[in-house]
């Protein structure tokens, strides 16, 4: 049986729990098409992934073959920090690349704003002569991004709006300054980075949490699939560790975004596994043995040097960075 759960957002729309991640280096069109064919109704993409054209082709093929109607799909894209004051331009690019006339969810990708290259609107950052990244003037410029995203909701080019990688510290600053509470906050969560306090804060404010890098990301640095507790629970349910890691989120009412290049794994990752409370408790406690480990950390995005306010000061943790 596939995962068909969906969750109500604070704006009245619904988000399918199972979303396909598309930060991928291959086979995107085929995987998107296969995912839809096998019941996925939520596709997560972003300008920065460079995969929006292929995502659009996979969606178009599925719609053309009448596997799904556009209104039954949930497509997310995100505004990269160099577009912090050019949301409309960012969305123009994404919609054109995706061959869509609206998205279901538009997110601030990171709570950071970077100076753009006037010669190359697609450049993802600029550097100073010493190699440091060129930030915009104000730490709160990303809130301008969110305000422009609010306008896109009014224009109908996105149904819902939200944020990504926004910690409690930053979220408080946002909530003080904007009209619309984000519908979604997307950030890294898996048993090595359970983010309990962050999840609680979002849920208290009616913000649906979506987990990225649920399988430990493509770097292979986090050995989640080898974790003995995940392996034991997978064996108990006669399934894969991937399914266990994905269903851990769905069982706790979070949307989740597994990525794969493989048609076989995209089907397997969509399977429902009836985890019981004992399984969930065991998965919740893994980090006590491993310490917390982070796969995605663009250190150069962190102007304050505080990992964007994500607090892990109560636990011993080691970061494994995806990129240097
Ligand atoms: N908002 C943000 O800042 C942000 C950041 C990161 C990610 N995301 C979103 O979240 C999505 C998922 O995160 P992610 O791409 O970092 O990685 P992920 O989904 O945690 O892991 C992907 C890796 O797991 C492998 N894999 C997939 N299914 C598997 C299975 N059943 N068993 C074993 N290995 C499996 C994949 O290999 P194969 O491809 O070979 O199967 C790939 O190496 C992204 O694609 C993106 O949409 C958002």
Image: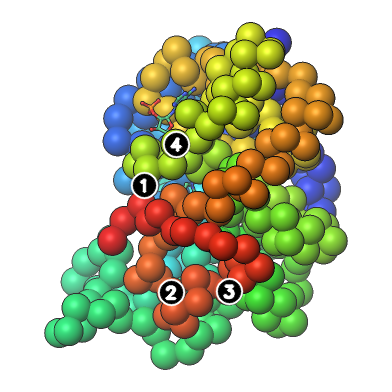
Spatial distance from mark 3 to mark 4, Cα to Cα?
25 Å
Q: Is mark 1 within 8 Å of ligand 1?
A: yes
Q: Are dots 3 and 4 in contact, CB under 8 Å? A: no
Neighbour tally class for label 3: few under 14, some 14-19, many 20 plus, Cα within 10 Å: some
Whether label 2 touches label 3, CB < 8 Å: no
**Mark pair 1, 2: CA separation:** 20 Å
Residue at the far left in the pictured view: 129
Is disc 2 surrounded by few (<14), some (14 to 19) or many (20+) residues within 10 Å? some
Q: Is residue 270 visible?
A: no
Location of ligand 1 given as a quarter of the image: top left
Q: Residue 263: percent from the left, percent from the top?
A: 42, 15
Q: Residues within 10 Å of mark 4 (few under 14, many from 20)?
A: few
- Residue occupied by mark 4: 223
Which residue appears at 63% of the width and 9% of the height?
A: 238
The image quarter containing residue 305 is bottom left
Tag in front: 1 or 3: 3
Mark 1 or 3 closer to N-term? 1
What is the C-alpha distance between the residues marked 2 and 4? Answer: 25 Å
Say which of 148 and 19 sits in front: 19
Q: CA distance from mark 2 to mark 3?
A: 9 Å
The residue that disc 2 covers is 302
Instruction: Estimate the spatial distance between the alpha carbons at disc 4 and disc 1, rounded to whole Å.
Output: 23 Å
Q: Residues within 10 Å of mark 1 (few under 14, many from 20)?
A: few
Find out whether the residues at labels 4 and 1 contact each other: C-beta distance under 8 Å: no
Label ID, residue 309 = 3
Residue 108 seen by the camera: yes
Q: Which residue is disc 1 drawn over?
A: 49
x, y percent for residue 197:
73, 61
Q: Is residue 224 left or right of residue 280?
A: left
Residue 116 position within the rendered picture, expressed as x and y whole percent measured from the top left: 31, 74
Labelled pair 2, 4 in contact (Cβ < 8 Å): no
């Amino acid at each position: 049986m596939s995962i068909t759960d969906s969750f109500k957002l604070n704006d009245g729309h619904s988000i399918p729990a199972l979303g396909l991640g598309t930060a991928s280096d291959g086979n995107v069109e085929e995987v998107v098409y296969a995912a839809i064919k096998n019941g996925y109704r939520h596709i997560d993409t972003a300008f920065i992934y460079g995969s929006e054209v292929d995502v659009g082709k996979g969606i178009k093929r599925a719609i053309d073959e009448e596997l799904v109607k556009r209104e039954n799909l949930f497509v997310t894209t995100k505004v990269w920090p160099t577009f912090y004051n050019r949301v409309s331009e960012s969305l123009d690019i994404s919609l054109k690349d995706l061959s869509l006339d609206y998205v279901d969810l538009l997110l601030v990708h990171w709570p950071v704003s970077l100076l753009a290259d006037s010669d190359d609107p697609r450049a993802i950052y600029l550097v100073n002569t010493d190699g440091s990244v060129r930030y915009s003037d104000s730490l709160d410029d990303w809130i301008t991004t969110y305000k422009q995203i609010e306008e896109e909701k009014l224009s109908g080019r996105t149904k819902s709006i939200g944020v990504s990688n926004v910690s409690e510290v930053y979220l408080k600053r946002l909530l003080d300054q904007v009209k619309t509470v984000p519908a979604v906050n997307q950030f890294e969560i898996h048993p090595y980075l359970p983010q309990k306090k962050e999840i609680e804060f979002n849920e208290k404010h009616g913000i649906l949490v979506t987990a990225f890098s649920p399988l430990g990301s493509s770097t292979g640095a986090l050995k989640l699939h080898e974790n003995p507790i995940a392996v034991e629970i997978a064996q108990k349910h006669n399934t894969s560790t991937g399914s266990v890691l994905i269903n851990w989120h769905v069982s706790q009412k979070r949307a989740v975004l597994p990525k794969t290049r493989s048609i076989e794994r995209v089907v397997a990752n969509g399977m429902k596994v009836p985890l019981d409370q004992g399984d969930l408790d065991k998965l919740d406690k893994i980090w006590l043995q491993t310490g917390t480990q982070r796969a995605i950390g663009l250190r150069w995005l962190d102007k304050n040097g505080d990992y964007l306010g994500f607090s892990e000061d109560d636990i011993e943790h080691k970061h494994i960075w995806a990129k240097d």
